Image (tube, helix red, strand yellow):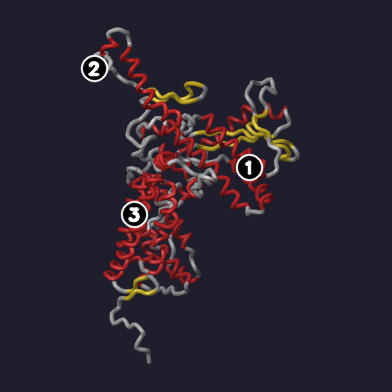
Amino acid sequence: MFPDSMKAFHTPNLDILGAPIGDYIHCAKFIASKRVEALKLLSRLQDVAVIDPQVAFTLLHVCGSFCRLAHIARSTPPSLSSDPLQIVDMAVKECFATCSALDLTEHAWQQAQLGLRYGGLGLRSLALHACAAYIASISSLGFADVDNQHLKHAVSTFNGLVSTQDTILIGSTVDSPIPQKALSFKIDTEQFRALLDSSSPANKARLLSASASHASSWLSVVPSVELGLHLDPHEFCAHLGVHVEVGSNLTPDGSRSRPADVLVRDWITGRFAAFDFTVSSPLSVASLNQACITSGFAALSAETRKHKANDPKCSELGGGDVVSRHNKLRDILAESCRRAHLGVQVEMGNNLTNHSHTRPADLLVPNWVLGKPAAFDLSVTSPLNPTTLLEASVTTGVAALTTELRKHSSNDTKCKELDWVYVPLVVESYGAWGKEALESISQLASRLATCSSKAKSVVLTELYGRLNLHLVRANAIAILACSLGQSDVGRYS
């Protein structure tokens, strides 16, 4: 009946269309062979990370982690694939730790495996989400059968990973297709809740801020130098460590030396001061002869040596002050307003009222609301501020909301006299934007979309990606300026 050239399988085990069919041992061997292929890619990514960890991470996220073996997760029952896939997950973890130069804790890795909308890094676990992938695949193809033992096991495993209200019945997989995205979101929701429950108040505030709308947009940008969306390797690794709350093995110059024992904010013209303590002996052979003649020569010699070693580092890192961060974000918004053909004016309102010498507007945008100009006032605040920490550990965006209210209290009267609409644009240091900022940036994106013929969603993603990337860069530079221990990182973010 069949031609002799047709391949025949005389065992229950076979491979077809890139997926194994058969018993546990066969599936494990097949996945192990795919793991060897994946390791080749992961090894190359580690080589790339030596030069550019941002590019290496982007490739790992887009094509080197979950998506690499998603086809197997969708076509092979989790009862046969979960254990072998855990080995692949460990290989991805090792690659990520190497690429980012981070000392990963279990808590940090759990966050990294969450989706971006939950403050994670999108390095989704194959083993954990295998049940969701399999259920979605079977359901979408109309092959669901309530008596299917593999499907029963997958549904049972899934229900054990999600909250009670998110559980599903095996019958629901037969009635209508269930998207894998929806199932994985439910798993992420429960993993995020468990992560919050096991965190300190400061970590809760950090996680909630990082999981806010658009907060993780900097992780999705194309790491292009020409587009201004590229981070220096040390900047990328430093902020990545803060994002998942672990320490970095890297210091600004790639060594373990640091230019600061103590970092003091706003020391001179709003910039950081790096205090570096050193004890020098006047009996040192190198300076003994001169120390016999000139008082303090040993100290002067040590000062000169320290300046020579650390001035280049501090000069490079000196842009990490709050003024530079504020001005860069302001300039990005000003450029966007110009591209939307809005006649924006920068730094308006100084000395125009009798209330104070402060300015109510970083940007003045004409004809914003009902023909009135809008005074955009940009601010960066921290969810780790002691005055709002407890509330920020419970509710997303509390620090931004508190700053909005304070800004309104200070500037509404000034702007009313000038017939301006006052709009505080507040962003938290971990990327969460305030409500008024979200509304205003959305309105700006609508105008940009009209002018550029792009979809608003595309424009919005690009704008938040650029804004948050520069926020991340400024935060990273501030952290690198001191290279302090993890316990001190929160104070400077």
| Mark 1 lies on residue | 336
Task: Check disc 1 and give the amino acid type.
Answer: Ser
Q: Is residue 155 visible?
A: yes
Task: Check disc 3 and give the amino acid type.
Answer: Ser
Precedes in sequence: disc 2 or disc 3: 3
Q: Which one is in front, 423 or 331?
A: 331
Dot 2: what SS?
A: loop
Q: Which one is in front, 310 or 273?
A: 310
Q: Residue at x 45, y 31 (%)?
A: 316
Q: CA distance from mark 2 to mark 3?
A: 49 Å
| Mark 3 lies on residue | 43
Q: CA distance from mark 2 to mark 1?
A: 61 Å
Q: CA distance from mark 3 to mark 1?
A: 40 Å
Task: Check disc 2 and give the amino acid type.
Answer: Val
Count how many numbered circles sit on residues in the image.
3
User: 194 left or right of 417?
Assistant: left
Q: Using the image, tell me which numbered label, if any, was put on residue 285.
A: 2
User: 223 left or right of 350?
Assistant: left
Precedes in sequence: disc 3 or disc 1: 3
Precedes in sequence: disc 2 or disc 1: 2
Q: Position of residue 122 (x, y in %)?
A: 43, 52
Q: Position of residue 241 (x, y in %)?
A: 39, 41
Dot 1: what SS?
A: helix
